[in-house]
């Protein structure tokens, strides 16, 4: 159960994305905004001949972004055949999970809980494992 | 249908190859049941396919073999050497017949009975069954639709009409490989676009431009072939439906005719496979639940025979497919009851639903209106699954139904991965693409032809007598918060007149129009799709992403799509009557700087050529455009600009000529009469445009003076002596200029033959209808010959021969 994880900072907290899903980590260049979309969709950016949909992970969780690293990076993933760039506050490194994801009593807080796969122990401490599908779906609707 | 046949042949060949080893192994050990099963499956598949294609001989053979093998599988018969040989003989025959079908040759008659009899050497009873079990696939819609009824006709005749001897070979490829190639080509297009931009910036470089043009042309060809590789006509899908309908209707004791429309529409191969199952299900539903039995139909005053129609059309980057039946429609009361019983909705919720919303309950999982679960539809696959499958491929499904009159199911399927021609427009500092198929016209806001009106909250643009609703792209996208209603803001805009597939027209105001571009459309993330504004994304040639606007959906959001007829057409008709008598013209400035007009019907296009492409001699002038030499007019009016010349390419329907102008101004309409002028024959008259007199060019005069006689499609032939240098180099050009085709072939029968004096009397009559003899001496000898340098005499003789030949 030594899953490789990309550790990063989202909304000021340590989080991890399964490294298997991540095709590459890029520095996002120019982003073309898409009008009419929710805030968490920052726009499109081009990677070679692909147009990536740029998702701001913090906003997608319904949270405010923390301090942004000077070289803000994004993880390139493909979900249902669509390529996305998941923009994080800061990308750290690829780390190894020591334990499988576990639930904690009381949850991680409403916003985090929705996207959480559980807590994983890594060599650099406990980290929240993020379910990337729920990032792409965006924050829970305000009403209802 | 030929495609289907080719596929059948390919598939059978493939199976034959694959089962070759099995056959040998079976021969070694007839008792090996594993081998037996494989061979059984092969003949079974062939039999099934033959039934569909109506190849009675193949079917009988495979059926007989299948029967014999089935006996063995059931243990009623022991396979022995004789049986193995008999089956192998049949398989060989199937292979040979398949080859014959593939190459369109006739396979020799007879011989089948012996093979079949060999199977049942020890049991004669096995023979009786097969023969005429399957009657030729009688299609109910033979008269109704030529496209569909052709299916069987072509097949019946296919083996007997020998096509070209070389078979068109086909191979199967994994779709992923095609995708990969396609993606590679798409990337190549992007790289080319990037290069094109850099070349443009660097200015003209003839040494690079020409090879680059060549590269572009090749790339365009490759791209269209690749696209074709992935595309398949919908006929392919339609081809299997008559059979399905026939089987289903027979089983259910109903009579159904099917009609197809739009089989020529092309769709991504993969997409066709994806919709095959949902479509089958919709057909099942329509026949099972939608269409009533004959008795009920007669009682309801309908024709005894039910009607099922499939129509497809391409609208932009979507294919819409409509399946309509004239059955009883969706029973919403029953749906409501079921939904209530299943606990999906409460009574209050259901009561508040509109009729349309209730119809949509068919897409709820677990609901079916069937009174009894039939063998066909009640297989646990409901319309909910159909919808899920359609949505999975990025399509949408809708249903509308009128009780007692029928149901229509609307499918919309995207053409993903396709390259579309698009118009790029700018708004709010960004570029967007619009599928060019929607764009009818582009009008500049500062044109005098355009008028604005605001009625309530709705804005209108009146252009060329048509009043159409207007949307501002800024507002659609939510950029421009400044609600500038005055027309001064509008004049700075450019209006793209959009015509949707539903024939609804509206104007889209954009900041500017950039260019025509071919774009590779990629699907967009679902969250972006949800906005309903975009249909896809594409990359600009500088590598930046650009969104493709989803115009039908934008129009629908602003209630600009009329349901069926009506809508804004009424406005259109009203205003059109006023302008009916007007003559559209194009205004331009001639080389002498004066304004003139030419009837718009004459103008084919506007060309810009380099000065070098124009050649003016004393009496005649020509211009070279796209490798074509065209007569030039209008050059006598004044001096040419130094570098580039604007040319109007005019046509009288047959010939073309170009008219040099210094500037093309605008299109206009002449609503009053044209005052004829007697002094100048080159003009038709003087027209009043914007209260100013403008001379209108006389098309008849122009073409009468400048057009060269068109060469007839099949020129008359003329033989000249092949051994005479003079005839070849001096005489032939003259004859060709007179509209003849020159040949030196002695054996060819020609319309005209020219003989030279020194040939004296020909040994045999030349195989020609008319003979012209030439002499060397200028003096006439009274023998009907013509002096070889008597140009006029020769031309007259050629002309006379021509008139005779035509008579």
Image (spheres, helix red, strand yellow):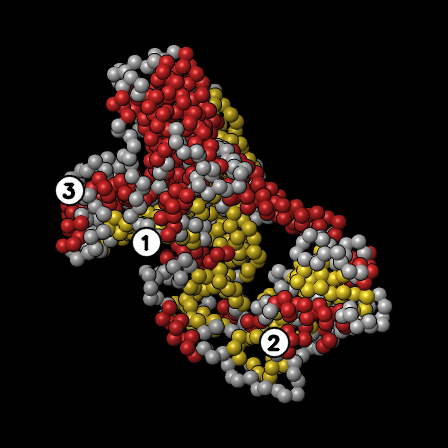
Quarter location, residue A126: top left
Q: Mark 2 lies on which chain?
A: B
Whole-percent x, y for residue A103 in the image: 34, 25
Whole-percent x, y for residue B223 in the image: 56, 44
Instruction: Judge if badges 2 and 1 mark residues of a common chain.
Output: yes
Q: Residues within 10 Å of mark 2 (few under 14, many from 20)?
A: some
Of the 4 image quadrants, the one containing the C terminus of chain B is: bottom right
Whole-percent x, y for residue B320 in the image: 38, 51
Of the residues tagged 2 and 1, which is closer to the observer?
Answer: 1
Of the residues tagged 3 and 2, which is closer to the observer?
Answer: 2
Ranked by sequence position, the earlier of labels 1 and 3 is 1
Residue at coordinates 55% horizontally, 60% vertically from top-left? B513
Q: How far apart are marks 1 and 3 (CA)?
A: 32 Å
Q: How far apart are marks 3 and 2 (CA)?
A: 72 Å
In front of the other: A67 or B698: B698
Q: Residues within 10 Å of mark 1 (few under 14, many from 20)?
A: few
Q: Is residue B610 left or right of residue B104?
A: right
In front of the other: A74 or B463: B463
Of the residues tagged 1 and 3, which is closer to the observer?
Answer: 1
Q: Mark 2 points at which residue?
A: B699
Q: Mark 1 lies on which chain?
A: B
Q: Mark 3 points at which residue?
A: B371
Q: What element carries label 1?
A: loop
Q: In this view, does B212 lie to the left or right of B558?
A: right
**Residue B331 seen in the figure:** no
**Residue B465 seen in the figure:** yes
């Amino acid at each position: 159960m030594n899953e490789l994880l990309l550790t990063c900072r989202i909304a000021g907290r340590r989080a991890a994305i399964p490294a298997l899903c991540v095709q590459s980590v890029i520095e996002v260049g120019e982003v073309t905004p898409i009008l009419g979309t929710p805030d968490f969709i920052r726009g499109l950016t081009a990677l070679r001949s692909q147009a990536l949909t740029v998702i701001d992970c913090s906003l997608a969780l319904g949270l405010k972004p923390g301090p942004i690293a000077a070289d803000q990076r994004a993880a390139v993933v493909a979900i249902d055949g669509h390529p996305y760039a998941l923009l994080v506050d800061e990308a750290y490194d690829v780390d190894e999970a020591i334990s499988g994801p576990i639930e904690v009593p009381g949850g991680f807080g409403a916003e985090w809980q929705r996207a959480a796969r559980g807590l994983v122990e890594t060599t650099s401490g406990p980290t929240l494992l993020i379910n990337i599908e729920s990032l792409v779906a965006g924050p829970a609707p305000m009403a209802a | 249908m030929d495609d289907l046949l080719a596929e059948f042949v390919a598939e059978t060949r493939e199976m034959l190859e694959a089962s070759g080893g099995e056959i040998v192994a079976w021969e070694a050990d007839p008792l090996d049941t594993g081998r037996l099963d494989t061979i059984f499956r092969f003949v079974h598949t062939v039999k099934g396919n033959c039934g569909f294609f109506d190849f009675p001989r193949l079917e009988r053979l495979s059926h007989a073999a299948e029967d014999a093998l089935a006996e063995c599988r059931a243990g009623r018969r022991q396979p022995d050497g004789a049986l193995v040989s008999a089956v192998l003989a049949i398989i060989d025959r199937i292979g040979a017949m398949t080859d014959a079908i593939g190459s369109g040759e006739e396979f020799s008659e007879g011989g089948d009975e012996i093979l079949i009899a060999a199977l049942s050497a020890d049991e004669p009873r096995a023979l009786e069954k097969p023969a005429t079990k399957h009657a030729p696939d009688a299609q109910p819609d033979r008269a109704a639709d030529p496209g569909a009824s052709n299916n069987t006709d072509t097949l019946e005749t296919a083996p007997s009409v020998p096509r070209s001897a070389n078979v068109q070979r086909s191979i199967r490829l994994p779709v992923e490989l095609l995708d990969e190639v396609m993606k590679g080509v798409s990337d190549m297009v992007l790289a080319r676009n990037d290069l094109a931009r850099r070349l443009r910036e660097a200015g003209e470089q003839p040494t690079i431009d020409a090879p680059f043009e060549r590269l572009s042309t090749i790339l365009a060809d490759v791209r269209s072939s690749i696209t074709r590789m992935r595309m398949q006509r919908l006929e392919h899908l339609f081809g299997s439906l008559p059979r399905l309908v026939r089987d289903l209707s027979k089983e259910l004791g109903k009579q159904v005719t099917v009609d197809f429309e739009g089989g020529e529409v092309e769709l991504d191969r993969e997409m066709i496979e994806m919709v095959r199952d949902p479509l089958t299900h919709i057909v099942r539903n329509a026949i099972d639940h939608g269409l009533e039995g004959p008795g009920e139909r007669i009682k309801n005053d309908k024709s005894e025979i039910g009607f099922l129609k499939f129509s497809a059309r391409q609208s932009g980057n979507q294919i819409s497919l409509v399946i309509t039946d004239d059955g009883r429609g969706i029973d919403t009361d029953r749906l409501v009851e079921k939904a209530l019983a299943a606990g999906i909705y409460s009574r209050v919720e259901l009561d508040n639903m509109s009729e349309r919303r209730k119809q949509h309950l068919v897409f709820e999982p677990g609901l079916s209106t069937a009174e009894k679960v039939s063998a066909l539809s009640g297989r646990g696959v409901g319309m909910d699954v159909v919808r899920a499958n359609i949505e999975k491929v990025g399509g949408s499904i809708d249903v509308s139904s009128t009780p007692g009159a029928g149901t229509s199911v609307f499918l919309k399927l995207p053409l993903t991965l396709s390259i579309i021609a698009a118009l790029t427009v700018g708004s709010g500092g960004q570029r967007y693409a619009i599928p060019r198929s929607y764009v009818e016209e582009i009008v500049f806001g500062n044109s005098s032809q355009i008028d604005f009106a605001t009625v309530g909250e709705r804005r209108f643009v009146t252009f060329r007598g048509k009043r159409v609703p207007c949307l501002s792209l800024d507002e659609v996208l939510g950029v421009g918060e400044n609600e500038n209603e005055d027309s001064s803001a509008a004049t700075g805009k450019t209006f793209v007149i959009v015509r949707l597939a539903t024939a609804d027209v509206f104007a889209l105001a954009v900041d500017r129009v950039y260019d025509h571009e071919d774009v590779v459309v990629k699907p967009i993330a679902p969250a972006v799709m949800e906005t309903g504004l975009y249909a896809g994304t594409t990359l600009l040639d500088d590598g930046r992403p650009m969104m493709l606007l989803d115009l039908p959906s934008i129009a629908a959001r602003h209630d600009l799509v009329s349901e069926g007829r009506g809508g804004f057409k009424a406005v259109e008709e009203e205003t059109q009557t006023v302008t009916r008598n007007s003559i559209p013209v194009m205004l331009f400035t001639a080389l002498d700087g004066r304004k003139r007009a030419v009837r718009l019907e004459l103008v084919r296009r506007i060309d810009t050529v380099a000065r070098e492409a124009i050649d003016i001699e004393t009496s005649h002038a020509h211009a070279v455009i796209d490798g074509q030499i065209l007569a030039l007019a209008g050059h006598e009016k004044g001096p040419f600009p130094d570098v580039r010349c604007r040319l109007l390419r005019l046509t009288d329907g047959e010939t073309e000529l170009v008219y040099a102008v210094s500037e093309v101004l605008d299109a206009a309409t002449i609503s009053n009469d044209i005052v004829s002028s007697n002094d100048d024959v080159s003009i038709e008259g003087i027209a009043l445009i914007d209260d100013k007199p403008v001379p209108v060019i006389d098309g008849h005069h122009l073409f009468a003076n400048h057009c060269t006689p068109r060469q007839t499609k099949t020129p008359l032939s003329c033989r000249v002596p092949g051994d005479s240098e003079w005839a070849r180099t001096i005489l032939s050009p003259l004859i060709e200029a007179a509209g003849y085709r020159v040949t030196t072939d002695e054996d060819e029968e020609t319309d005209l033959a020219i003989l030279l004096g020194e040939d004296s009397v020909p040994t045999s009559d030349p195989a020609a209808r008319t003979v012209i003899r030439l002499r060397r001496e200028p003096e006439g000898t009274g023998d009907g010959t013509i002096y070889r340098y008597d140009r006029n005499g020769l031309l007259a003789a050629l002309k006379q021969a021509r008139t005779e030949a035509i008579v």
